[in-house]
Image (tube, rainbow, N blue to C red):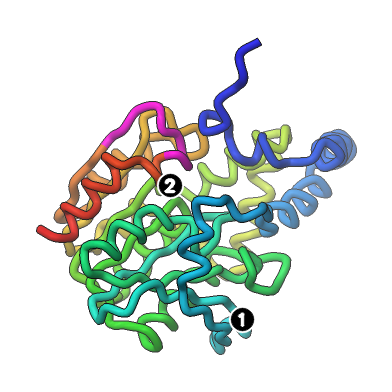
Amino acid sequence: MKTPNKDLTPVQALLLPKPILYTGKMLNFISPFLASRFAARMFLTPFSYKMPNREKTMYTNSKKERIHINTINREVIVYTYGTSEKKILLAHGWSGSGTQLSKIADQLLLMGYSTVSFDAPAHGKSPGKRTMMPHFIETINHLEKSHGPFEAAIGHSLGGMSLLRITKHGLQIKKLVIIGTANSITAIIKNFTKNLQLSPKVASLLKSYLDKRYGEDLNNYSGGVSALEVKIPTLVIHDKHDVDVHCSAGHEIIENLHQGQLLLTEQLGHRKILGDKKVIAEIVKFILE
């Protein structure tokens, strides 16, 4: 029997434990409202995983700091990889970590750059159990002040969406690279509830609950909305077979950027793309231009 390609399987479908799925289905049958509250807890809880061997060199050779972000009252782990004053900020995606973009960081190191990255709250080795996109944004905002300035920034998935948002609001970088980045918060929620095998009604209730909890329509954080006010050169990279974030998101974002370039790949999915040599070469070329 052919082994399924994990890079072409949604990460939530890979990692959600069966008891969680059973509980969600039962609550969905009893009460979509209760199922939406259960889903909210899951939605705000990143998965944890063992650090892959490919990330260990970056982890071992980085300067590691534990810093406090006053605006969100959370602590994060920050990694400084290299000693060059030419710094590039790296932002991982949901359930990722500060070393997730290690292969990109390795190549940038060879080209004379250092990188600054972080374990977002409740991710990697940072404390906490639950978090949300605004915590990513506040962490990036803090790092610009404490570890910047940065020549450029590179973000994967939710990290890319966070960078679009904060660049819109004045992150001082010359170039931006986003990889596998979603456009719509509503689409993210719909995909999440689908992977949790819950009904569209639960997705609608979950979106309303999160909007109320954070005091605004979270679609304001969508990639395409932020892209409208991003003026710097931006490279949008997306795989045509990304099952975590459909490639239509890349097209939607690129349409709204003032200086956008779109790089489409094939058969790399949502995660393998981060270690692809051709993709990394294009990222370095874009930053050096």
Depicted 100 relative to depicted 63: above or below: above
Q: Residue at x 69, y 74 (%)?
A: 127
Q: Position of residue 112 (x, y in %)?
A: 22, 69
Q: Earlier in the sequence, mark 2 or mark 1?
A: 1
Which disc number belongs to residue 182? 2
Q: CA distance from mark 2 to mark 1?
A: 26 Å
Residue 183, given in percent of the width and then of the height, sits at 40, 47
Circle 1 crowding by C-alpha within 10 Å: few under 14, some 14–19, many from 20: some
Which labelled disc corresponds to residue 49?
none
In the rendered structure, which segment of residues is drawn in magenta?
A: 264-272
Q: Amino acid at mark 2?
A: Ala
Residues at badges 2 and 1 in contact (C-beta under 8 Å)?
no
User: What amino acid is labelled 1 in the image?
Assistant: Glu
Q: Is residue 284 left or right of residue 135?
A: left
Q: Is 48 displayed left or right of 86 in the figure?
A: right
Residue at horizontal 47%, vertical 59%? 92
